[in-house]
Amino acid sequence: MVKNSTYDLIIVGGGLAGLCCALHLSKHHLKILLIEKYEYPHHKVCGEYVSNEIMPYLNGLGVDPFAKGAVPISKFEISAKDGQLVSSKLPLGGFGISRYTLDHMIYEQIKDRVEVVFSTVESILFSSEIFSVRTILKDTYTSNFVVGAFGKRSLLDNFLNRSFIQQKSPWLGVKAHYDYNFPEEKVALHNFEGGYCGLSKIESGAVNACYLTTFKSFKPFGSIEIFQKEQLSKNPHLEDFFANAKPLWDKPLTISQISFEKKKAVEDHIFMIGDSAGLIHPLCGNGMAMAVHSAKLFSELFLEAFQKQEFNRTKLEQTYLIKWEETFSKRLYNGRLIQNMLLSPITAHMGLKIAQLFPSILPKVIKKTHGDLLI
């Protein structure tokens, strides 16, 4: 059944990028449909540390994470798998907040301005300048423009035959919340054989532990519990954490086939934002900020065309592609370089030794994967 043919824009995916895009555009009298798989609030596999670079923009949208108890974070520490540790101040600082809380508070702002449908999209077709978006419930929604904000990996990536989806990815993500005595002002990144684990406090007082590993590293252990005890705990900092932290969930959340391959920011005339356009390595601690920034980037370009009633699709797509590359391509490239360095025992050891000798290097490296304050 065709539900409605009068939407100015359909946003597929209600994570941070999709929600911020919906909130931004809803302030300008556009008719928007947001389709999200899960009802709010819900947890997601995510590091839950956010760079302060996006705080001015969030505040401009009327979103204040500190009103919900977000934890200010100003310090960073990183360890090699043998426990060798380097500490630094964060150039801009950041805050810790769960996706459960942050996504929900943005949803609360849009739910009366934007039509929201909780369902899974199975297909997006473009014909005669009109998109038809079909859900698994067989409802079809139409619009002239579609934004893809469906995250790291989706069935839609297969439907659209995106090039990166053809390459099998070795990465597995695991996340859970714990009760543990951890400094509020600090975010930590601890390496282990085949991956790395981030620790930081969130608004509830819990510690979010989120790690990325390869299937090759995980497979011999057979279970998350054994893997954490026997592999992650070879790093003494993670050994202390998993020995003493009390799990607050029955079991961790997991996500597989996380791809860091290059993606197109426009695919079959769909404007991709957030992780759908490009995923920075979690060790850089900037994925959430990039998702929000990409929503701002698209929303401003779309509004400019909407207000002038100058919807030249080709021009809008080309402009967005150029702006996206200018804004994010260097960050993603630097993220790949840093990950490759840290996953190699030799280069990781050398890099951390140099950082210990020259402490000013680490903030400069962090800046390579972050942006300026987003006004």
Image (tube, grey):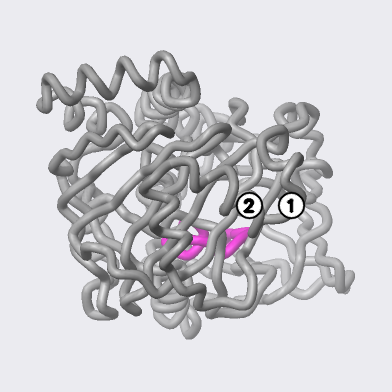
The residue drawn where x is 77% and y is 31% is 168
> Residue 251 location, x and y as percent?
64, 71
Q: Is residue 277 above or below residue 241?
A: above
The residue drawn where x is 28% and y is 27% is 368
Task: Please tell me the numbered disc located at residue 10.
Answer: none
- Residue type beneath disc 2: Val
Residue placed most toward the observer, 48 or 161: 48
From mark 1 to mark 2, how far is it between C-alphas? 7 Å
Q: Is residue 156 above or below residue 175?
A: above
- Label 2, on which residue? 146
Q: Which residues are magenta?
A: 8-20
Disc nearer the start of the sequence (1/2): 1
Residue placed most toward the observer, 257 or 164: 257
Q: Is residue 276 left or right of residue 375?
A: right
Residue placed most toward the observer, 186 or 243: 243
Q: Is residue 180 left or right of residue 164?
A: left
Q: Which quadrant holds residue 355?
A: top left
Q: Is residue 235 left or right of residue 72?
A: right
- Label 1, on which residue? 131
Q: For the view shown, which residue lies furthest in the bottom direction? A: 112
Q: Is residue 299 visible?
A: no
> Residue 206 location, x and y as percent?
37, 73
Disc 2 secondary structure class: strand
Dot 1 crowding, Cα within 10 Å, few <14, some 14–19, many 20+:
many
- Residue type beneath disc 1: Phe
> Within the magenta stretch, is there residue 9?
yes
Q: Is residue 19 above or below residue 78?
A: below
> Residue 212 location, x and y as percent?
55, 43
Asked if disc 1 and disc 2 are in contact, CB closer than 8 Å, the reply is yes
The N terminus is located in which quarter? Answer: bottom right
The residue drawn where x is 28% and y is 36% is 370
